[in-house]
Amino acid sequence: MSSDAAPGPAPADLEMRQAFLDFYLAEYKEVVRFVMYCGATVHAAEDAAQQALEIGWRKVLRGEWNQVARPQAWIRRVARNCHLSQQRGSGEVPLAAGFDRAVQGPGHAELADQARDLIALLQLLDAECQMVFALRFDGVPGPEIAAELGITPQRERDLYKRARQVLRNNWKGGSQRDDGNATPA
């Protein structure tokens, strides 16, 4: 007996569809965030991400999704292009918040002096304190530092406290110039 129902997609097609749906769920928020980093508003980024994922779905339906070598990069590029295409049509030119305000900051020479002074201060620490301070500065939690260095958590806290004390006692509140006068901080 023959059936009038159209045959469903081949198992390989079902796998590709499921892989794309999993990709969609995993990447949607990251694609939206990426398009926002490129200057889009939340709503414009969501629209661009949705358009890009729709283009990806069309590739799935044509059996071409497996030909995309780097899906994460591909979907972000397509989403950015969708956003730029939307912008061209709207005639809007978005500016970053605070774009028209000039910000005064230290010059290169001042930054170089500060870096030199900081390095000199850090050299005042013993090797253990330097290691603990550097790991803390890189965002490693205290218990992980203790485990990595093979010391107790209390010892790690003591070393960090000693490092901070040495730096505090030797910091002049500004960079020292050759003439011995401190520059304002």
Image (cartoon, grey):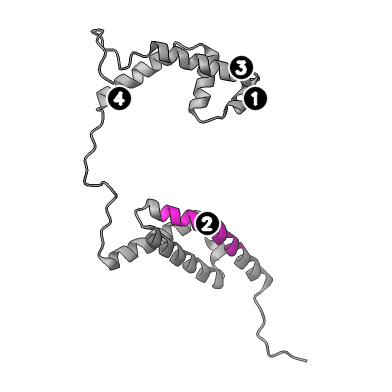
For label 4, count other residues whose C-alpha is less than 10 Å away and answer few (under 14), some (14-19) or many (20+): few
Q: Earlier in the sequence, mark 4 or mark 2?
A: 2
Which amino acid type is marked by label 3?
Arg
Label 3 to label 4, Cα distance in Å? 34 Å
Name the residue located 65 percent from the left edge and 66 percent from the top edge.
Answer: 15
Image coords of residue 38 (percent x, y): 36, 53
Image coords of residue 76 (percent x, y): 45, 56
For label 1, count other residues whose C-alpha is less than 10 Å away and answer few (under 14), some (14-19) or many (20+): few
Q: Earlier in the sequence, mark 1 or mark 4?
A: 4
Residue at disc 1, secondary structure: helix
Label 4 to label 2, Cα distance in Å? 39 Å
Q: Nearer the viewer, mark 2 or mark 3?
A: 3
Q: Nearer the viewer, mark 1 or mark 3?
A: 3
Q: Which residues are magenta?
A: 19-35
Classify residue 100 as left or right of residue 45: left
Q: Is residue 26 magenta?
A: yes
Image coords of residue 40 (percent x, y): 36, 57
Which amino acid type is marked by label 1?
Ala
> Residue tagged by mark 2?
27
Q: Earlier in the sequence, mark 1 or mark 3?
A: 1
Q: How many marks?
A: 4
Principal SS element in the magenta part?
helix
> Residue tagged by mark 4?
111
Name the residue located 54 percent from the left edge and 20 percent from the top edge.
Answer: 132
Label 1 to label 3, Cα distance in Å? 11 Å
> Residue tagged by mark 3?
155
